[in-house]
Structure formats: C-alpha cells, structure tokens
Image (cartoon, rainbow, N blue to C red):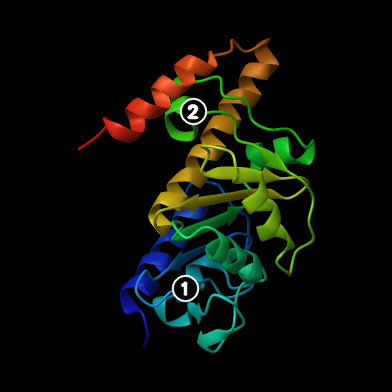
Amino acid sequence: MMLQKLRQEVCELHAELPKNNLVAWTSGNVSGRDPETGLIVIKPSGVKFPDLTPENMIVVDEMGRVVEGDLKPSSDTASHCYIYRHRPTTFGVVHTHSRYATAFAAVGRSIPCITTAMGDEFGGPIPCGGFALIGGEEIGQVVVETLANSHSPACLLQNHGVFALGENAEAAVKAAIMTEDNAAIVWTALQIGNPISITDEDIQKLHHRYQTIYGQ
C-alpha cells in the first residue's frame, strides 16, 4: 500500500471534522500531499466518517487521476488538485460546510477580523470568494484567486462553505477549526451590537508575533 503514513494521518484527521462540528453526514474532506512524490491522499466520495480507514483512502496524482484505491475519490478532488498545482507551499487542504462560517458564505460576506485570536491566525479578515459549481476545478480556481493577496489560510465560497489550506494536512484542519470558532464569535458579537474593530497595524503585529514567536 502506497503512502501508508500519509494515509494514516489523513484518515485520523478526518475524525476531527465531526468532532469539531464542522461537517454533517458525509460532507467535507481532507487531503494531504506527499512532498517527495507529489501524490495526494484524499477521502473517498460519500463514505461515512466512522467507516474511513487508511486502506480506503484514495491516492491520486496532481491531475486527479487515481493511482491507488478501489473507491471513487471525493467529488472535490479536482479542486484540491488545482490548489496544490497553483500553491507549491500547500501540502494540506480541508473543505467543510461548518455552520457559522457557511452562514457568512450564504450571504457572500467575509468574516471581519475583530478578535486578537483571529489576528493571530488569519492576519486579517477571512475572505469570501464567488460562487462555483462542484465537480471540476472551478472551486479550486476561486480559492486560489481569493487567497492570492491574503494572509488568511482559509476562505469562504459563496453559497457553499469553507476551504482551508496548510503546510500539511494537520495545519489545514487547524485552520478550518479556527475559521468556524471565529465565525461563531463574530456572528454572536453581531447579535449583541457593533463589534469593535482592531486596527490594521495591530492586526499585523498580532499576526507577526503569532507566526514568529508564539509556541515552542
């Protein structure tokens, strides 16, 4: 079996999506790209999360052609592959329909940066891209265009949901979790009143500290 370690990692990370209330039923997916071969491991289409195993993960090349696996790959495979081809430093991609973030997507609205945690992680707002149909590369194209001039590792797609990217699959899952957490905070704040903005200068200071100093 090819890419056993990456298969195991991607399989285990899928469990984080329902655990963090980011998906319902079989929606959503995680993929990871192997830095040595460039091959991509992704979830099979329409399989329930408890039934996912390292063995039934699908290995595809960067054009989305199945290299190993007996099941059909995720319907978002072409978009994942487009993102990888156009973002060489991305090695993990996650797609979710998490509730609060998708509510912002449903009205075509970016999530404003109004918390220090969001400044840390995203370095500004989480942008919302336009609408694209599922099944081809179009969603991937919108993601790449939307994030081209943003510090954010995640974006919304109008009427659809969230795409989050990372230096590996775990980092992409973290970005998806943080997207939903901050979307819920912002939505709640909007019910109370007008959220207080953080200046762009302070957001950049927060982001720089978090990316270069925070942690071990």
204 over 97 or under it: above or below: above
Q: Can residue 40 be spotted in the picture?
A: yes
SS under mark 1:
strand
Residue under the point 47% across and 73% down: 41
Q: Are marks 1 and 2 in contact (CB under 8 Å)?
A: no
Q: Position of residue 120 (x, y in %)?
A: 42, 28
Q: Position of residue 47 (x, y in %)?
A: 59, 73
Residue 41's disc is 1
Question: 43 and 141: which one is in front?
Answer: 141
Q: Badge 1: few (under 14), some or many (20 or more) residues near its Cα, within 10 Å?
A: many
Q: Badge 2: few (under 14), some or many (20 or more) residues near its Cα, within 10 Å?
A: many
SS under mark 2:
helix
Identified by mark 2, the residue type is Met
Residue 118's disc is 2
Identified by mark 1, the residue type is Val
> Could you give the CA–CA distance between mark 1 and mark 2, rounded to whole angstroms?
29 Å
Q: Position of residue 73 (x, y in %)?
A: 60, 77
